């Protein structure tokens, strides 16, 4: 069957990339050396402490962003609705920017202060959007969508305002953070992301059939027995938390959450039991490749990965979209 | 004496300041075919939406199968009541006809209850009754209006509910498809014993196929009774404020209803 084989191909590709990506870099590592345990101390440190955590992190972040985007697009029945367009990332960024601007330095349980602030920012936006959409006692996705967009703009403006008030150094740090990046050392970031990623993913996977139903419209879904509001709330919270956690770890990396699910729809169709795993794999694959590219293309310097995802993703997506039409 | 599958007592629905339904009370027995007619904005669709809990807050006025609405989770309600909403203009669901009809089995499937033989059978049965087999692999979005309505009806049928709510199931259809849908509904009612509540603007459809007619006007019930007494009184004039003529139908003992115009 075509769908199963597409999934299998994605799976194989993912494994290949996960195996090969940590070997590539300014200082390539030979696979034989790794297999014979004959890495030098430096190589070993590079592989285990820098490259492997980074590749695993980028794969998880990409996967989570794509899955979250898919879930939002489906519950709102709107291809532009993603946690990013709905303000979660702006909130998180605002948290991080405040942290940078105030020059704070703290950490809790091994999680950096900037991550915590970003996460707090995401939480604020999630709550505000949720409260706004329940204000008129009837919970509506339309209100939620607009509230999210409004909150996104509001916090983006606050970020610009803070940047304007900052000196060059702060302003540059803020700008660099806003471009997103995956340069981590060790597994701490990955571990702090993992619980949120797992919970969010499980919630989305639990509701896959509901997501199918929601694509046929609210009325029909309710008629078939879907608790539409319940599902929407559960997914909104779980996905927002999960995305908040990724932005906290690696800044806002845009575009992946919007285009990966779309590309997967073109490849594999709309049924969520195929679409969800495809999005997870594709998102992971795509971000890992982009990040590897970002690491090596102007080595030893790096391009912010957020720039690459948009630069590569945009044209690729257009090509697929237009190709499919014919 | 057959048992009431739907009991509505003093149902009132308000949207903001607008009173959409006031003090609506009626019962529907198992196996009945009831048509609900009335002018635009009379509250017909809202009535159906309240029964299926799309419009909430009426838990104490509506009883389905002997239990108040609030005793049902949405999915439990969907095993008893299926709902065919008004055609959503321009909506193209990204599924094939067969996939879509299979999704009608939603309320019967769970985490520990996968899609099984019974479900396949129900889907096949629904496809047979509605005659959608020839285009089962086409996307819903690529169908004509008539084929689409058949597919939607099949989806509701696959739900295997004993009460079906239909909101203008034959509106916008050409005569052929209209008659086919009407026939399917009649068979559904007489052969499978499914209770039907059909909201319609097609007075002839209501007169020709249903056992009973309920007329709504300005959110209130203005008539509730069998077809004979509906035609005998001056009901149509009361409801629509227009004159109608009855003409004999050579193929049925129920007459045609014609709107008089110049």
Image (cartoon, coloured by chain):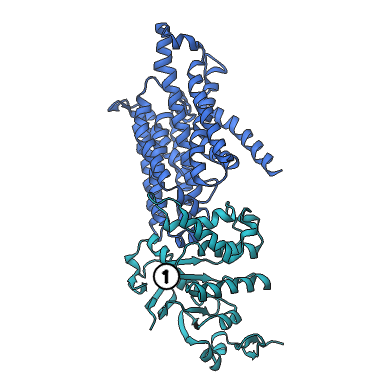
Pick the residue in front: A108 or A165: A108
| Residue at the image point whose x is 61% and y is 71% from the top | B171
| Residue at the image point whose x is 42% and y is 58% from the top | B107
Chain letter corresponding to the colour blue = A
The picture quadrant where one finds residue A265 is: top right
Q: Total label count? A: 1
Name the spot of residue B146 as percent of width and height, x first: 64, 65
* Position above or below: B18 against B241: above
Name the spot of residue B81 as percent of width and height, x first: 43, 67
Name the spot of residue A9 as percent of width and height, x first: 55, 32
Q: Is residue B141 left or right of residue A290?
A: right
Name the spot of residue B19 as percent of width and height, x first: 43, 75
Chain letter corresponding to the colour cyan = B
| Residue at the image point whose x is 49% and y is 79% from the top | B34
- Residue position for label 1: B51
Q: Please report, as a chain letter, where disc 1 is located.
A: B
* Position above or below: B54 against B13: above
* Position above or below: B38 against B89: below
Element class at badge 1: helix
Q: Is residue B143 left or right of residue B108?
A: right
Pick the residue in front: A232 or B98: B98
Local crowd size for mark 1, using a 10 Å CA cut-off: few (<14), some (14–19), many (≥20) = many
Can residue A159 be seen at all in this image of the molecule?
A: yes
């Amino acid at each position: 069957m075509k769908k199963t084989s597409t999934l299998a191909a994605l799976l194989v590709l993912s494994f290949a990339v996960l195996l090969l990506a940590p070997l590539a870099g300014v200082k390539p590592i030979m696979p034989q050396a790794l297999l014979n345990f004959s890495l030098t101390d430096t190589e070993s440190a590079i592989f285990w402490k820098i490259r492997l955590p980074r590749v695993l992190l980028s794969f998880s972040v990409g996967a989570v962003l794509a899955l979250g985007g898919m879930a939002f697009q489906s519950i709102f029945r709107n291809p532009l609705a993603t946690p990013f367009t709905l303000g979660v990332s702006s909130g998180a960024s605002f948290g991080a920017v405040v942290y940078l601007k105030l020059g704070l330095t703290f950490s809790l349980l091994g999680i950096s202060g900037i991550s915590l602030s970003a996460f707090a920012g995401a939480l604020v936006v999630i709550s505000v959007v949720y409260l706004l959409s329940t204000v008129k006692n009837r919970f509506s996705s339309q209100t939620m969508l607009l509230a999210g967009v409004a909150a996104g703009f509001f916090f983006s403006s606050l970020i610009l305002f803070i940047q304007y008030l900052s000196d060059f150094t702060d302003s540059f740090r803020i700008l660099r953070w806003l471009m997103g990046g995956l340069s981590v050392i060790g597994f701490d970031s990955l571990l702090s992301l993992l619980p949120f990623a797992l919970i969010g993913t499980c919630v989305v996977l639990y509701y896959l059939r509901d997501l199918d139903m929601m694509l046929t419209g609210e009325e029909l879904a309710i008629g078939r027995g879907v608790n539409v509001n319940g599902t929407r709330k559960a997914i909104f919270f779980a996905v927002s938390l999960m995305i908040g956690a990724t932005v906290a770890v690696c800044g806002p990396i845009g575009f992946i959450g919007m285009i990966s699910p779309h590309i997967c729809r073109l490849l594999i169709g709309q049924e969520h039991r195929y679409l969800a795993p495809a999005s997870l794999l594709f998102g992971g694959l795509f971000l890992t490749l982009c990040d590897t590219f970002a690491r090596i293309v102007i080595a030893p310097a790096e391009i912010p990965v957020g720039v690459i995802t948009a630069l590569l993703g945009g044209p690729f997506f257009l090509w697929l979209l237009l190709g499919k039409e014919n | 004496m057959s048992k009431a599958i739907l009991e509505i007592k003093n149902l009132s629905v308000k949207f903001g300041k607008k009173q959409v339904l006031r003090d609506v009370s009626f019962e529907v027995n198992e196996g009945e075919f009831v048509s609900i007619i009335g002018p635009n904005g009379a509250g017909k669709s809202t009535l159906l939406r309240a029964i299926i809990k799309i419009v909430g807050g009426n838990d104490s006025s509506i009883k389905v199968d002997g239990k108040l609405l609030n005793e049902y989770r949405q999915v439990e309600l969907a095993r008893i009541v299926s709902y065919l909403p008004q055609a959503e203009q321009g909506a193209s669901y990204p599924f094939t006809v067969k996939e879509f009809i299979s999704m009608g089995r939603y309320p019967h499937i769970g985490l520990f209850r996968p899609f099984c033989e019974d479900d396949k059978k129900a889907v096949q049965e629904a496809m047979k009754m509605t005659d959608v087999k020839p285009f089962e692999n086409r996307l819903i979005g690529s169908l004509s209006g008539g084929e689409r309505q058949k597919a939607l009806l099949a989806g509701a049928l696959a739900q295997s509910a004993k009460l079906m709510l239909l909101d203008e199931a034959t509106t916008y259809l050409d005569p052929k498809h209209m008659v086919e849908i009407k026939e399917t509904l009649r068979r559904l009612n007489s052969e499978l014993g499914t209770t039907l509540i059909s909201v319609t603007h097609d007075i002839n459809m209501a007169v020709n196929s249903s056992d009973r007619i309920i007329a709504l006007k300005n959110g209130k019930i203005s008539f509730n009774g069998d077809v004979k007494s509906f035609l005998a009184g001056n009901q149509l004039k009361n409801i629509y404020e227009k004159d109608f003529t009855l003409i004999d139908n050579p193929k049925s003992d129920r007459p045609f209803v014609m709107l008089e115009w110049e």
